[in-house]
Image: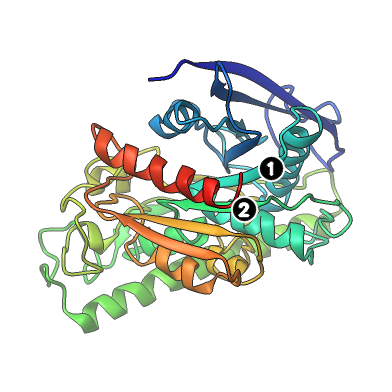
């Protein structure tokens, strides 16, 4: 493998907030500090950089960035201000973070072209950012707080890669949340008709279509019940006129996804009885589930199916730059249709889609599938003269 090196990168910009939303130095002093790693060939290398950002995770330890760098293309893996803590995450502010990194890659690091490499949750983020950079429409968050993307002067990226990407965090939560929960303060108060992991569940895989439709409708109802409570609480806090402006809350049981138990639902090569976090039943009740802890404003921006703007399918319809979409056929996280839905929605006339057979979400122990992914995206970049 050609020699590569890792270089720490710091991106900083000024911003003031109504209140401190992240713990520590990262955003409490009127300055947003972002950290990341530039992985690049020791010698040579392209003047095009692939920029990776996930809303809440770090990406430099994944196998993909180093493999792309070894193939001659530098990869800049940047964390948002909410890295490893999505409880207060506001998507509109993550777009500002990504915009600062796009600008930094060109102005400070000197790259001619920047391609957003949207892996997993970074896919819908990349599309959200690019849509607002090309056609900005947002001046406030779903909670009504000012975050003016129209005036931010976001620099559009030169291309977008979707790799094992889901449509949105809000849609994913809606697909996974446990509809049996009747009382948000008591997760043991459950409707036995939809208690997916209960031995007394009246159905077994393959699940009947009418039951599955009712299950999905129950998931939407639960998300909307939580959203209604969030909006009511925000209204109450604002109407008091005190210094209390935000609250955190717990959402129990958020991994009740029938597709991980039923191979007939959106069939592909994924393992049945497991998901990317382990045993689905354990994840459903565990402390690291999706949206387990959230702030009120974050719920509206990140998790509400009716309010979050970072929907990959919608945002793809507003971008014009070249795009390549790569599906993993054995993805144990992303639903089978998601990548193709975003691909079909993409307004760009320069787009292509591929599926890597047998690839899991993380390429764990899959060097052949990893190489296929790298060859696809680097070949695509070279065909565009990058």
Any part of residue 77 in sight = yes
Q: Earlier in the sequence, mark 2 or mark 1?
A: 1
Q: Nearer the viewer, residue 372 or 251?
A: 372
- Mark sitting on residue 113: 1
Camera-side residue of 87 and 34: 34
Where residue 91 appears, as percent x and y from the top left, is 66, 51
Q: Quadrant of the C terminus?
A: top right
Q: Is residue 316 above or below residue 367?
A: below
Q: Nearer the viewer, residue 37 or 121?
A: 37
SS type, badge 2 = strand
Relative horizontal placement of residue 306, taking residue 338 as reference (left or right): right
Crowd rating for badge 2 (residues with CA inside 10 Å; few <14, some 14–19, many 20+): many
Q: Nearer the viewer, residue 279 or 162?
A: 162
| Residue on which disc 2 sits | 159
The image position of residue 64, as x and y in percent, is: 42, 34
Disc number placed over residue 239 in the picture, else none? none
Kindly indicate whether the residue at mark 1 contacts the one at mark 2 (C-beta within 8 angstroms).
yes
Residue 172 lies, in percent from the top left, at 43, 59
Q: Is residue 183 visible?
A: no
Q: Residue at x 16, y 51 (%)?
A: 273
């Amino acid at each position: 493998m050609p020699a590569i090196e890792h270089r720490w990168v710091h991106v900083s910009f000024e911003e003031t907030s109504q209140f401190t939303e992240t713990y520590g130095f990262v955003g409490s002093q009127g300055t947003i500090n972002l950290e990341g790693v530039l992985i690049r060939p020791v010698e040579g290398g392209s003047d095009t950089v692939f920029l990776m950002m996930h809303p809440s995770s770090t990406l430099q330890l994944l196998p993909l960035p180093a493999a792309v760098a070894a193939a001659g293309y530098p990869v800049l893996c940047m964390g948002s201000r909410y890295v490893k803590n999505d409880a207060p995450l506001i998507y509109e502010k993550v777009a500002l973070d990504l915009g600062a990194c796009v600008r930094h890659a060109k102005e400070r690091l000197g790259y001619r072209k920047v391609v957003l490499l949207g892996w997993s949750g970074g896919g819908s983020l990349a599309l959200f950012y690019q849509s607002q950079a090309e056609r900005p429409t947002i001046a406030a968050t779903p909670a009504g707080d000012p975050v003016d993307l129209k005036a931010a002067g976001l620099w559009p990226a030169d291309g977008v890669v979707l790799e094992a990407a889901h449509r949105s965090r809000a849609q994913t939560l809606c697909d996974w949340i446990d509809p049996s929960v009747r009382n948000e303060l008591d997760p043991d108060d459950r409707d036995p008709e939809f208690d997916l992991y209960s031995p007394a569940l009246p159905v077994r895989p393959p699940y009947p279509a009418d039951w599955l439709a009712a299950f999905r409708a129950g998931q939407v109802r639960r998300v909307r019940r939580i959203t209604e409570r969030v909006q009511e609480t925000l209204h109450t806090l604002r109407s008091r006129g005190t210094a209390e402006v935000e609250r955190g809350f717990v959402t129990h049981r958020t991994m009740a996804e029938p597709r991980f138990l039923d191979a007939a639902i959106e069939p592909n090569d994924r393992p049945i009885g497991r998901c990317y976090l382990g045993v689905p039943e354990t994840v459903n009740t565990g402390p690291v589930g999706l949206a387990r802890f959230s702030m009120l404003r974050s719920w509206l921006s990140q998790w509400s199916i009716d309010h979050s703007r970072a929907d990959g399918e919608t945002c793809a319809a507003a971008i014009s730059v070249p795009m390549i979409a790569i599906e993993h056929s054995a993805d144990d996280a992303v639903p089978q249709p998601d990548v193709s839905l975003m691909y079909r929605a993409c307004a760009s006339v320069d787009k292509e889609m591929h599926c890597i057979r047998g690839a899991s979400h993380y390429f764990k122990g899959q060097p052949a599938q990893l190489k296929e992914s790298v060859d696809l995206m680097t070949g695509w970049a070279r065909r565009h003269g990058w």
